[in-house]
Amino acid sequence: MIYELNNEYFVRPLAEEDLDGAYPKWFENQDVCRYNSHGKFFKTKAYFKKYLDDINKEDRVVWAICHATDGHIGNVSLQEISLINRTAEFAILLGEKRHWRKGLGLLASRRILEHGFNQLNLERIYCGMAATNEGMKKLALAMGMSLEGTRRQHLFLDGSRVDMLEYGILQSEFRKV
């Protein structure tokens, strides 16, 4: 399954050959991992191989975000999919910084929300982020998500406690966006 995002970008399933590219290095880049826990502990190739093997379960959808000439530049996913509750957690990681601030995150995000609501029949998709992550807050709002709550002092980032904000969108709200 490949979805075109525009004439330069597309999404496809994450593949084993992605492990041989820059992908594992993104998790060592402190700018890329500034607002998540990925950059706290180094990961081996075996870790990424196990992750790749585990994405074939029905509790997640992980897509590689690709550029026509640069190849794999990020991931977008639905995680913690509950087929009983019909919910999933949204996540995105753009590892190649030269592709930041081009609207790509929104294109990939809308496509995976569409997949979640229309193909997986989800009712609610949500995401959590550091209150200091202005880019992710803007993305959540642009996707049509609403602020649903705050987990006070939930995260430890850069030596300080930070609130975590939770945003979500219902299937009926997505259809209106």
Image (cartoon, rainbow, N blue to C red):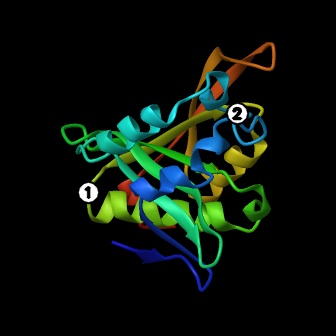
57 relative to 39, above or below: below
Question: Horizontally, is 72 left or right of 176 in the view?
Answer: right
Residue identified by numbered label 2: 35
Residue 171 locus on image (x, y percent): 37, 56
Q: Nearer the viewer, residue 172 or 111?
A: 111
Residue at image coords 41%, 47% = 78
The mark found on residue 128 in the picture is: none
Residue 95 versus residue 133 in the image, above or below = below
Q: What numbered label is drawn on residue 120?
A: 1
**Where in the figure is residue 98, as x and y percent of width and height?**
79, 62
Give the image quarter of residue 157. Answer: top right
Quick check: 138 left or right of 51? right
Contact (Cβ within 8 Å) of mark 2 with mark 1: no
Nearest to the observer: residue 145 or residue 162: 162
Q: Is residue 49 left or right of residue 94?
A: left
Question: In the image shown, does 19 or 113 lie closer to the viewer?
Answer: 19
